[in-house]
C-alpha cells in the first residue's frame, strides 16, 4: 500500500484493482484487462417493425468489437451486423425514416438504417448553447412523436426534451429524474452494498408501458456482482418519478424472482423494450469480475406490470421458452438444475486451487481448471438421485486473455446409463467451430444419475475450464403441477387391478380391487356394468375396493375398467371376471 496519500475516490479504484492484486510494494497497481472479444455490456434495444436490434459496449478500449449490432425476429436466432462506428454504451432511436445514435461523451450520429453507415450530426446543445456532453445517454421516442434524452454517468440521472427533427437541439431545461437515495440499500456501491456515501448511479433509461412512464437506473458498480437495476414511474415523461405501489427494487427480487437460485441474481445496465406482441423484454448486464475490473455478459428475460404499476422480472437461469412461445400459458418449461451443490464431482485433474467443486457452486467467479499437463480433461457430475434430464448449460472459463472472438471449445457430453452401467453419448461437439462463452444444449430425455464432460480441444489451443456446469432435469411433481409434460410423454399411473365374480345369499356380485403401486396418492375410479365408484387420495400401497351388486343369480364372463389419476398423469386398466351361477 505504497500510496503516500489517500483520497475518498481511491476506494472504488482499489476495489477493482484488488481483484488481480498488486505487482509489488512501491510499484503501480495492475490488473488483467477485459478481453475485448468475449464480453459485452450496457445493452440498448430498438424495435424496428418487429425486428429487434441490440447495441452494446464491447471490450473497453476496443471500438472494433463495439461496432457490432445484433438483430433478431424470434429471440432465438441472432444476426451480427458490423457497423462503421462503435460507441461505449450506445443508444439508437428511430425518428421517421432516420436513425440517431449517441454514446458516452460523443456527438450524435445519423443513418438511414439501424446498422448505419453512420455520419456525424453534431453535439447536442442546451438552450444556453452549452454542449451537452454526458455518459450513458439514452433516447426515448414517445408515442406522440416527442423525443427525450436521459443521461448521466453518476447521480443524478437527468432528462431533457429534444427536437425530433434535429436531436442536437435541446428544447427544455434539464430536470432531475432519479437521484441517489442512501436510504435505499440496493443503490449502495460495492459487492456487499457496503459503500453508502454514493451509489454511482448510471444506465438511466426511459420507457413506456401503456400510459405509464418508467425510468430505469443502475447502481452498485459495474465491477461488482451486486450491480443491479431499479425503476420508478411517472404519468409524464419529465415529471416527478415515484416508486409504484408494490414495486420491489432491485429488479429480480420482486414477485417473479427465483433468487437465490439464479446464477446471476442481479441485472445491471440494460434496456427495457416492448415488442410487437406486447412482451416487455429486459436485456441486461451481469458481471463476472474475478480477474478483471470488468467482465460482463448478456441476460434476457421477460417482465410484467402488475395492477398497481409495479414492474417485476424473473431473472431466470433455467430453460425458458422464447417470448411469444408458451405451453399451457407457461414459458418456464419445468426443468430444474440438478447438478449444483448437492452433487458429487470427479475430475481427471485440477490445477492448484481450482477444485471440481467450483464448477458447481452456483458462482461465475470461481471455476474448475484442469492441471497443466492434463491431456484429456474430464469432468463428471453425479446427482443425488436419478433424474430425467434433457438440457445442459456450460459456462466456459477461458484461462488468460490470449484468444480472440473466434476461439471455440470442442467437447463431448455423455450420460451414465443406469441399466447397462456404461457411458452413453448425449452431445458430440468435438468438431465445434462456433465460438461461445457459454453453451446451451438440448438432447433426448434420458434417465441418469451422472454426466461426463470431456474437453477435446479449442480452435486456438487455449486452456479452458468450467465456471459452471448446469444440468437440467425434471422435478416430476412440480413439472406435473405446472402442466408442462405433453400427454404423449406422460407416464401412466401404475395400478394392479383384480376382478372376481362372487355369490352372496344366492345373488351374484362383482368384487373389484385396485392396488395403487405408484409412488404418490391417486384418484381411482372403478367402473362396471353394474355401477361405478370413485376413491380420492388412495395412498401408495393401498387399495380401492368395492363389491358391486348385480341383482342377478347368474353372470356371464365380463370386464371391469379402472381409471387412475395423479396430477396430469392418468391410466386406464381393464380386468376380466369369469362366468358364475349362484342357483
Image: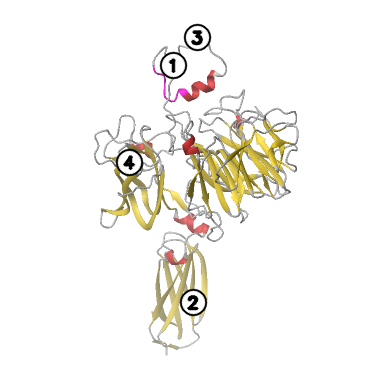
Residues packed near mark 3 inside 10 Å, few (<14), some (14 to 19) or many (20 plus): few
Q: CA distance from mark 3 to mark 2?
A: 90 Å
Q: Which marked residue is nearer to the observer: mark 4 or mark 2?
A: 4
In the image, residue 322 lies at what x, y percent?
A: 52, 54
Q: Which marked residue is nearer to the observer: mark 3 or mark 4?
A: 3
Nearer the observer, 487 or 541: 487
Q: Which mark is residue 441?
A: none
Quarter occupied by residue 290: top left
Q: Is residue 358 left or right of residue 324?
A: left
| Residue contact between numbered discs 4 and 2, judged by CB atoms under 8 Å | no
What stretch of residues is rendered in magenta?
A: 17-23
**Quadrant, the C terminus:** bottom left
Tell me which secondary structure the magenta stretch mostly adopts. loop
Residues packed near mark 4 inside 10 Å, few (<14), some (14 to 19) or many (20 plus): many
Q: Mark 4 or mark 1, which is nearer the start of the sequence? A: 1
In the image, residue 18 lies at what x, y percent?
A: 45, 22
| Residue contact between numbered discs 3 and 4, judged by CB atoms under 8 Å | no
| Residue contact between numbered discs 1 and 4, judged by CB atoms under 8 Å | no
Q: Which marked residue is nearer to the observer: mark 1 or mark 4?
A: 1
Q: Which mark is residue 345?
A: 4
Identify the residue position indicated by label 1 in the image: 28
In the image, residue 257 lies at what x, y percent?
A: 56, 44
In the image, residue 282 lies at what x, y percent?
A: 57, 45
Q: Mark 1 or mark 3, which is nearer the start of the sequence? A: 3
Identify the residue position indicated by label 2 in the image: 527
Identify the residue position indicated by label 3 in the image: 4
Residue sitting at x 44%, y 35%: 36
Amino acid at each position: 500500500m505504497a500510496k503516500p496519500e489517500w483520497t475518498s475516490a481511491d476506494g472504488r479504484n482499489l476495489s477493482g484493482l484488488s481483484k488481480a492484486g498488486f505487482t509489488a510494494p512501491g510499484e503501480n497497481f495492475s490488473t488483467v484487462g477485459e478481453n475485448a472479444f468475449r464480453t459485452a455490456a450496457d445493452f440498448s434495444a430498438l424495435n424496428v417493425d418487429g425486428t429487434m436490434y441490440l447495441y452494446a459496449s464491447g471490450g473497453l478500449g476496443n471500438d472494433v468489437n463495439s461496432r457490432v449490432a445484433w438483430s433478431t425476429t424470434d429471440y432465438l436466432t441472432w444476426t451480427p451486423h458490423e457497423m462503421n462506428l462503435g460507441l461505449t454504451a450506445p443508444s439508437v432511436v428511430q425518428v421517421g425514416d432516420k436513425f440517431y445514435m449517441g454514446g458516452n461523451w460523443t456527438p450524435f450520429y445519423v443513418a438511414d438504417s439501424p446498422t448505419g453507415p453512420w455520419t456525424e450530426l453534431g453535439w447536442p446543445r442546451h438552450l444556453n448553447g452549452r454542449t451537452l456532453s454526458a455518459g450513458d445517454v439514452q433516447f426515448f421516442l414517445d408515442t406522440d412523436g416527442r423525443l427525450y434524452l436521459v443521461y448521466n454517468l453518476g447521480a443524478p440521472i437527468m432528462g431533457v426534451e429534444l427536437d425530433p427533427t434535429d436531436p442536437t437541439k435541446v428544447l427544455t431545461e434539464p430536470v432531475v429524474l432519479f437521484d441517489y437515495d442512501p436510504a435505499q440499500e440496493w443503490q449502495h456501491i460495492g459487492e456487499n452494498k457496503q459503500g453508502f456515501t454514493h451509489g454511482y448511479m448510471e444506465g438511466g433509461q426511459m420507457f413506456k408501458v401503456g400510459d405509464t412512464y418508467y425510468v430505469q437506473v443502475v447502481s452498485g458498480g459495474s465491477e461488482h456482482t451486486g450491480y443491479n437495476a431499479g425503476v420508478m414511474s411517472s404519468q409524464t415523461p419529465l415529471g416527478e418519478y415515484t416508486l409504484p405501489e408494490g414495486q420491489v427494487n432491485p429488479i429480480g427480487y420482486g414477485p417473479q424472482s427465483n433468487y437465490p437460485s439464479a446464477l446471476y441474481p442481479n441485472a445491471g445496465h440494460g434496456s427495457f423494450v416492448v415488442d410487437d406482441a406486447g412482451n416487455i423484454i429486459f436485456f441486461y448486464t451481469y458481471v463476472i469480475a474475478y480477474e478483471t475490473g470488468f467482465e460482463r455478459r448478456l441476460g434476457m428475460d421477460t417482465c410484467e406490470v402488475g395492477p398497481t404499476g409495479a414492474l417485476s422480472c424473473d431473472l431466470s437461469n433455467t430453460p425458458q421458452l422464447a417470448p411469444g412461445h408458451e405451453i399451457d400459458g407457461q414459458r418456464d418449461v419445468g426443468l430444474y438444475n440438478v447438478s449444483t451443490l448437492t452433487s458429487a464431482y470427479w475430475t481427471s485433474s485440477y490445477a492448484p486451487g481450482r477444485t471440481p467443486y467450483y464448477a458447481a457452486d452456483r458462482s461465475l467467479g470461481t471455476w474448475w481448471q484442469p492441471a497443466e499437463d492434463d491431456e484429456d480433461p474430464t469432468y463428471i457430475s453425479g446427482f443425488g438421485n436419478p433424474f430425467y434430464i434433457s438440457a445442459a448449460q456450460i459456462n466456459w472459463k477461458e484461462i488468460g486473455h490470449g484468444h480472440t472472438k473466434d476461439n471455440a471449445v470442442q467437447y463431448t457430453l455423455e450420460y451414465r446409463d443406469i441399466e447397462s452401467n456404461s457411458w452413453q453419448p448425449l452431445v458430440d461437439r468435438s468438431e465445434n467451430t462456433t465460438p461461445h462463452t457459454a453453451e446451451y444444449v438440448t438432447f433426448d430425455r434420458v434417465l441418469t444419475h451422472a454426466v461426463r464432460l470431456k474437453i477435446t480441444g479449442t480452435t486456438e489451443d487455449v486452456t479452458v475450464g468450467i465456471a459452471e456446469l448446469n444440468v437440467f432435469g425434471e422435478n416430476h411433481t412440480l413439472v406435473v403441477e405446472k402442466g408442462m409434460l405433453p400427454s404423449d410423454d406422460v407416464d401412466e399411473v401404475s395400478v394392479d387391478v383384480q376382478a372376481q365374480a362372487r355369490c352372496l345369499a344366492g345373488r351374484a356380485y362383482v368384487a373389484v380391487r385396485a392396488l395403487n403401486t405408484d409412488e404418490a396418492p391417486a384418484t381411482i375410479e372403478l367402473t362396471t356394468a353394474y355401477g361405478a365408484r370413485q376413491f380420492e387420495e388412495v395412498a401408495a400401497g393401498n387399495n380401492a375396493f368395492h363389491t358391486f351388486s348385480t341383482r342377478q343369480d347368474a353372470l356371464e364372463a365380463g370386464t371391469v375398467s379402472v381409471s387412475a389419476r395423479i396430477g396430469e398423469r392418468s391410466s386406464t386398466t381393464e380386468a376380466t371376471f369369469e362366468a358364475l351361477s349362484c342357483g
